Amino acid sequence: MVAINYKNATVNLAEDVYEPAEDSFLLANAALSTATNGMKVLEIGTGSGFVSAVIQANKNIELIATEINPFAAKCARSNGVKVIKTDMFAGIKEKNEFDLIIFNPPYLPTSEDEKVPGWLNYAFDGGITGRDPIRPFLLNVRNYLKTEGTILLLVSSLTSIDDVKNEMSEFYFDSHIIARDKCSFEELVVIKGNLRKV
Ligand SMILES: C[S@@+](CC[C@H](N)C(=O)[O-])C[C@H]1O[C@@H](n2cnc3c(N)ncnc32)[C@H](O)[C@@H]1O
C-alpha cells in the first residue's frame, strides 16, 4: 500500500480514493496556518483523510469529517480521522459549533462524457461550471459554523475564482485568497471566508 508522510502525519492510500495532490497540500498548509489549539474543525469530503490527518498531527484540535465515497471514508478512518459517511453536512448534529470548516471540493468543469466511472467521480466532477458542489456547501455551511468561524475553500482558476467569490458574497461571506499555487494548467487558491457582520 502506498503511504504519504507529511508534516508528522502518515496517510495510507487505497483504491478508488482521491490521491492527495497539489490541491490537498495547499489546503493542508493553509489549514495549519489558520487552525489554533482548542478549535473544533469540520472537513467536508476528506478523501483519504490527508488534510485532516495533517491538522490533527500538528494541532491540539477536535476534528470530524464527512465523505460520500465509502472507500474513502474507510481509508480516512484507517488513517485515524473520525469520519461520517454521508452527503455533505447530513448527519452532522453539532449546529453552529465549528470554528473552522474546510472543503477541497470536486472542482473540475465536467461534461457527461468526461465523467469517471465509479465512486472516484465524486472527487473530480464539479458539473459543467466546476462549481456545482460549492453552492450546496455555501447554502448549508453557516448552520454549522460559529458566528466568528472561518471557512477555507480550495478552488481552481478552471472553476472561475471570481464567480466563487461572488457566490460567497451572495451567502454573506467576506472572502479573500490566503494561498496560491500555479500548477501546469491551472492556478489553485485557498479562499478564506468569514460571515459578514450585520
Ligand atoms: C478533490 S477530493 C479532495 C479529497 C481530500 N480532501 C484531499 O484534499 O485530498 C474531493 C472529495 O470530496 C468528496 N465528496 C464529493 N462530494 C461530496 C459530498 N457531497 N459529500 C461528501 N463528500 C463529497 C469526494 O468523494 C472526494 O473524496
Image (cartoon, grey):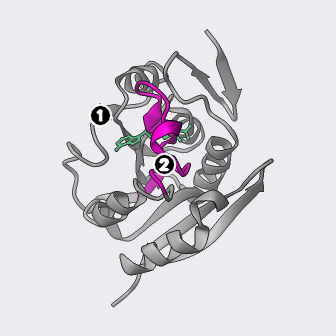
In this rendering, position of residue 180 left or right of residue 169: right
Q: Is residue 126 visible?
A: yes
Q: Mark 1, residues whose alpha carbon is within 10 Å: few (<14), some, or many (≥20)? A: many
Q: Along the line of sight, which residue is nearer the eye, 63 or 2?
A: 2
Which residue is rendered at x = 43% and y = 30% of the image?
A: 81
Location of the C terminus by quadrant is bottom left
Location of the N terminus by quadrant is top right
Q: Amino acid at mark 1?
A: Ile
Tally of numbered discs: 2
Magenta residues, dominant SS class: loop
Residue 94, position in %: x, y?
Answer: 22, 52
Residue 157, position in %: x, y?
Answer: 66, 61
Q: Is residue 156 magenta?
A: no
* Residue hosting label 1: 84
Residue lying farthest to the front in this orientation: 113
In this rendering, position of residue 71 left or right of residue 130: left
Residue 150, position in %: x, y?
Answer: 46, 66
Ligand 1 positioned in quadrant: top left
Q: Which disc, if any, is residue 105?
A: 2
Between circles 1 and 2, the one closer to the viewer is 2
The relative height of residue 5 versus residue 15 in the rendered view (above or below) is: below
